[in-house]
Image: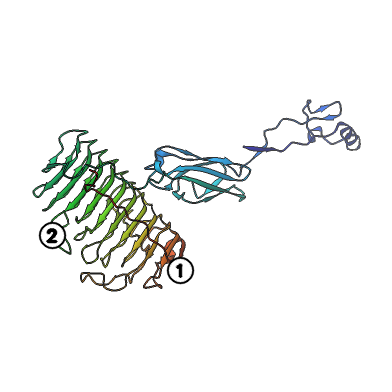
């Protein structure tokens, strides 16, 4: 802390004698009487406690602590460049489930910083902080995030045994921790294909599950650290078109289970592909989906319900609008911190459904606060909307999204036309903090209805004049090859 000391002035002895000669009544008390002050005619500074504290325009520490940020594995300590007023933070996206992070900022005790310490910020881009002293002086600092992405691995399946080499099996109920269920072809019509209740560390690998009736392909609860890998799961008794009999026939459904890994998994014709309820920090990668069948409130490829954090990356879903019965393609309900990345969504025939929907993040029962990221996802044949943050949600970023072939007419199977007049981005009844960055909408059927309401977005950055080639879909092969 800087201090400026104001020194007390003292009288010179020569001047003092002259003054006493001219003004004999003048009292010595008008000058200092400290004997250490006057020494052989030399003026000496006296010690003093009279000082004024000047606050410093400086950030002394910038740290993003894991204890304050759900989904962050370790603290991120900023490196401060005092000369340039820059702060560098290294963010490894594999170690955090969201880029909406709360920093702890230390400044001089007599200064303030804006935005305030602990305020969530989107660190996918630069953030400016202003330090202000008591007397109103200001200094800006720019935080520069250095984003480290995990290496992009192309979709692949580990060597998968032919179906003829898989052992035929009926339904399975897990009976112990760390149980492994491998290389099976499970067929069931009278209970769930695989059921797990209260057992952790289970691995389901290289299985084909065909199920029907009012059941699930895989159903689990209190099954922390579950891994589902290299599996194909299909509801085999779906009608030729339209919804299933009820909404309880999901390919995968999980409750109250943490740290799930679901990778290289194909889901077909279920009410919903993957539904997670109170399942925190899940990792879903290389997911292939086809024709989600509903009915309402199901119809999603993936739904997060009261979940904290989670990653869905490298995925695709194709819904034939004359076969599927969709709602939101990806639903983030009463949940926060999810990252939806590197995906392809084709087909939505719901008059109310949206491609990716964040909703009710601050309503009763919601978990995780607010925030989320949708990045590098392509949307085709959408009607009611591409991406939304609504009804109490906020701090959601839509980055590098691309949309075309938007539908204004009949959506399919007599479900009507889009109720939003084919809106692309929405953020109504939001708490704010939403952003549209570097997005592309090509030849929308309703070019005057791209964003509503625009004032609900802090940043609006999109183009509407460039065609694009959609991302390649995820294709997982579970059949026998000629060499097997």
- Residue contact at pointers 2 and 1, CB within 8 angstroms: no
Along the polypeptide, which appears first: circle 2 or circle 1? 2
Q: Which residue is mark 1?
A: 465
Image disc number at residue 432:
none
Q: Is residue 276 visible?
A: yes
Q: Nearer the viewer, residue 148 or 113?
A: 148
* Whole-number angstrom distance, CA of label 2 to CA of label 1: 43 Å
- Residue 146 appears left or right of 37: left
Q: Position of residue 333 (x, y in %)?
A: 29, 54
Image disc number at residue 245:
2
Q: Position of residue 405 (x, y in %)?
A: 35, 68
Q: Residue at x 40, y 42 (%)?
A: 94
Q: Nearer the viewer, residue 90 or 81?
A: 90
Task: Tell me the SS state at disc 1.
Answer: loop
Q: Residue at x 43, y 63 (%)?
A: 440
- Could you say which quadrant of the image residue 472 lies in? bottom left
- Could you say which quadrant of the image residue 6 lies in? top right
Q: Residue at x 18, y 64 (%)?
A: 242
Task: Tell me the SS state at disc 2.
Answer: loop
Circle 1 residues within 10 Å: few <14, some 14–19, many ≥20? few
């Amino acid at each position: 802390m800087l201090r400026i000391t104001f020194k007390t002035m003292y009288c010179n002895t020569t001047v003092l004698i002259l003054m006493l000669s001219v003004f004999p009544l003048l009292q010595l008390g008008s000058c200092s009487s400290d004997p250490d002050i006057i020494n052989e005619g030399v003026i000496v500074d006296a010690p003093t406690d009279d000082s004024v504290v000047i606050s410093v325009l400086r950030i002394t520490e910038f740290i993003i602590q894991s204890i304050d940020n759900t989904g962050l594995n370790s603290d991120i300590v900023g490196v401060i460049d005092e000369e340039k007023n820059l702060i560098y933070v290294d963010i490894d996206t594999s170690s955090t489930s969201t880029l909406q992070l709360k920093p702890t900022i230390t400044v001089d005790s007599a200064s303030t910083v804006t935005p305030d310490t602990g305020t969530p910020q989107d660190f996918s881009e630069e953030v400016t902080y202003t330090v202000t002293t008591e007397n109103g002086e200001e200094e800006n600092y720019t935080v520069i995030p250095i984003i480290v992405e995990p290496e992009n691995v192309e979709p692949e399946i580990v060597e998968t045994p032919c179906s003829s080499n898989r052992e035929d099996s009926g339904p399975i109920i897990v009976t112990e921790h760390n149980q492994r269920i491998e290389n099976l072809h499970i067929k069931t019509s009278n209970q769930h294909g695989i059921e797990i209740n209260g057992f952790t560390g289970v691995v389901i690998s290289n299985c084909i599950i065909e199920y029907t009736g009012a059941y699930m392909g895989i159903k689990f609860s209190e099954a922390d650290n579950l891994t589902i890998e290299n599996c194909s799961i299909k509801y085999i008794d779906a009608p030729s078109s339209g919804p299933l009999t009820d909404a309880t026939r999901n390919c995968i459904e999980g409750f109250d289970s943490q740290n799930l890994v679901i990778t290289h998994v194909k889901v077909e014709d279920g009410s919903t592909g993957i539904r997670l309820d109170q399942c925190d920090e899940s990792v879903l990668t290389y997911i292939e989906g086809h024709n989600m069948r509903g009915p309402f409130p199901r119809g999603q490829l993936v739904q997060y319900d009261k979940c904290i954090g989670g990653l869905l990356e490298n995925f695709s879903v194709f819904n034939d609008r004359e076969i599927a019965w969709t709602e939101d393609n990806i639903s983030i309900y009463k949940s926060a911190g999810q990252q939806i990345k590197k995906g392809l969504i084709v087909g939505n025939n719901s008059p109310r459904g949206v491609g990716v929907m964040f909703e009710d993040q601050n309503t009763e029962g919601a978990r995780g606060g607010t925030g989320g990221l949708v990045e590098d996802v392509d949307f085709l044949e959408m009607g009611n909307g591409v991406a939304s943050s609504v009804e109490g949600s906020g701090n959601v970023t839509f980055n590098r999204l691309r949309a075309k072939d938007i539908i204004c007419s009949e959506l399919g199977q007599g479900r009507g036309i889009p109720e939003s007049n084919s809106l692309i981005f929405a953020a109504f009844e939001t708490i704010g903090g939403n952003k549209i960055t570097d997005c592309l909408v090509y030849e929308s059927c309703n070019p005057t209805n791209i964003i509503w309401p625009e004032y609900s977005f802090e940043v609006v950055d999109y183009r509407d004049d460039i065609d694009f080639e959609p991302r390649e879909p995820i294709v997982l092969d579970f059949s026998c090859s000629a060499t097997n």
